[in-house]
Image (cartoon, rainbow, N blue to C red):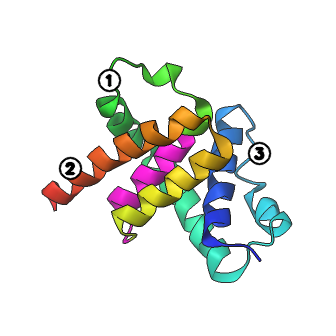
Amino acid sequence: MATITHAREAVVQTLYAKELGNDDAIKQFDELLKERKIKGSKAEFAKKLLNGVLEHQEEIDKIIKDHLIDWSFDRLDKVDKQILRLGIYEIKYTDTPFQIAIDEAVKIAKNFSEDKAKSFINGILDRVAKENKDEN
């Protein structure tokens, strides 16, 4: 049975495919959800996340760039970039508690990224969450 984490992973994979130049990745999202048996409210949740990240990507990328220390945005691992985009979207633009958004991002990083990516992603999302909390 598909979980909410699987829904988030499908979003990251679709964003990654788009980043690599697959212009049909967004159109193929529904098919990916079907293949992964992500249905009902979980599929709707995934669609909202994907559309939200795409809608706010410019602002999200600026936030990522502002939080990179001694690293350029272009050098970021493409998978890590998508995980950060999703995590920041959830922290800034949804009702998802920031702790859950961060935990889910780290869990996805464990499955799709290198070991060192977990702490990198955790650190950036934690700083974004603290700043977001201060703003609200």
Q: Residue at x 71, y 40 (%)?
A: 17
On residue 41, the disc is none
Q: Amino acid at mark 3?
A: Asp
Classify 111 as above or below 99.
Answer: above
Q: Earlier in the sequence, mark 2 or mark 3?
A: 3
Q: Does the stretch in magenta take in 89? A: yes
Q: Residue at x 56, y 55 (%)?
A: 107
In percent of width and height, residue 56 lies at: 42, 49
Front residue (pair 96, 112): 112
Q: Amino acid at mark 2?
A: Glu
In percent of width and height, residue 106 lies at: 51, 51
Does residue 92 appear left or right of residue 78 in this picture?
left
In this view, the residue farthest toward the bottom is 40
Q: Which residue is mark 1?
A: 69
Q: Nearer the viewer, mark 2 or mark 3?
A: 2
In percent of width and height, residue 14 lies at: 69, 49
In this view, the residue farthest toward the front is 115
Q: Which residue is mark 2?
A: 131
Q: Which residue is mark 3?
A: 24
Q: Earlier in the sequence, mark 2 or mark 1?
A: 1
- Which element is circle 1 on? loop
Q: Does the stretch in magenta take in 33? A: no
Q: CA distance from mark 2 to mark 1?
A: 16 Å
Q: Main secondary structure of the magenta part?
A: helix
Front residue (pair 119, 49): 119
| Res 56 seen here | yes
Magenta region, residue range: 82-95
Image quarter (top left, top right, bottom left or bottom right) of the N terminus: bottom right
Crowd band around label 2 with a 10 angstrom C-alpha radius: few (<14), some (14–19), many (20+)? few
Q: Amino acid at mark 1?
A: Ile
